[in-house]
């Protein structure tokens, strides 16, 4: 499987632009972590692209991403990619057994949260987002209330990295795709 095939699957099943942008953000963070952990950047990026591809069809915990995994297997997507996608949701029975499996869980909620922080800055620019401001917003339960803060902190723990380091790493991973994500400034 290559990136183009993954993007085509995403676009076939995901019509909402915000979900497509989320896939791009998670792809960027996953590719950065692949570089850090010596993984294959394209494979890790594909996990990022596809992790929520079925969410519009299966928005419940009972179905997402389990039913999506069935679709991916039918299309011949490699098992390591499907397994990592199952690992991004801690309510599945999938046991993370690789850095890729742990990274997808760690970056999923955090990428969206960092983007939300960038978008409320007057500049709407990721360059103006600091770890301190992300952590301050994490304490505000009314801000981006759908984001599971525990997943952010547990994700850093699963990776075995300091939370501040993890947040900064993901901020930095989003900068190269800031324009595509709408966080390159006004």
Image: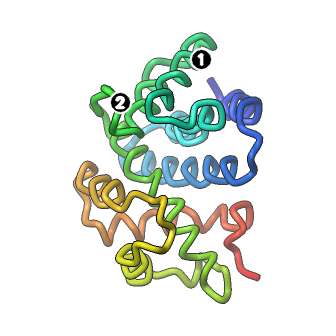
Say which mark, if any, is on residue 20: none
Q: Give the mark nearest the N terminus, 2 or 1.
A: 1
Residue at x-position 76% and y-position 30%: 12
Within-10-Å neighbours for mark 2: few <14, some 14–19, many 20+:
some
| 3 with respect to 36 (left or right) | right
Badge 1 marks a residue whose secondary structure is helix
- Dot 2 falls on a residue whose secondary structure is loop
Residue at (31%, 34%) from the top-left corner? 98
Q: Are marks 2 and 1 in contact (CB under 8 Å)?
A: no
- Counting from the top left corner in percent of width and height, residue 108 is at 47, 51
Tell me where residue 46 appears, x and y as whole percent.
Answer: 57, 36
Q: Position of residue 148 (x, y in %)?
A: 39, 57
> Going by the image, does 22 lie left or right of 108?
right
Q: CA distance from mark 2 to mark 1?
A: 16 Å
Asked if 39 appears above or below 28 in the picture, the reply is above
Q: Residue 126 appears at what percent x and percent y?
A: 59, 76
Question: Which residue in the structure is indicated by mark 2?
Answer: 92
Q: Foreground: 3 or 120?
A: 120
Label 1 neighbourhood size at 10 Å, few (<14), some (14-19), many (20+)? some
Relative height, residue 171 to residue 91 (above, below): below
Residue 52 higher or lower than 63, as above or below: below
Q: Which of the two residues, 8 or 69, is positioned nearer the viewer here?
A: 69
Instruction: Identify which residue is drawn at 70% across, 28% down.
Output: 9
Image quarter where the N terminus lies is top right
Q: Quadrant of residue 93?
A: top left
Residue of label 1: 71
24 vs 153, nearest the viewer? 153
Number of on-image labels: 2
């Amino acid at each position: 499987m290559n990136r183009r095939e993954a993007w085509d699957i995403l676009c076939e099943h995901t019509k909402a632009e915000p979900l497509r942008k989320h896939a791009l953000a998670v792809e960027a963070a996953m590719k950065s972590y692949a570089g850090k952990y010596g993984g294959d950047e394209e494979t890790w990026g594909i996990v990022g692209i596809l992790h929520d591809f079925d969410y519009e069809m299966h928005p419940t915990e009972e179905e997402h991403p389990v039913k999506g995994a069935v679709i991916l297997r039918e299309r011949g997507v490699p098992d390591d990619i499907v397994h990592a996608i199952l690992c991004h949701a801690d309510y599945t029975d999938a046991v993370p057994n690789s850095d890729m499996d742990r990274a997808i869980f760690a970056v999923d909620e955090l990428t969206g949260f960092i983007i939300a922080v960038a978008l409320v800055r007057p500049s709407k620019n990721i360059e103006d987002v600091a770890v301190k401001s992300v952590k301050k917003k994490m304490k505000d339960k009314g801000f981006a209330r759908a984001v599971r803060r525990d997943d952010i902190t547990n994700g850093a723990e699963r990776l075995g990295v300091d939370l501040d380091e993890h947040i900064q790493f993901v901020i930095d991973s989003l900068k190269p795709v800031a324009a595509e994500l709408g966080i390159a400034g006004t």
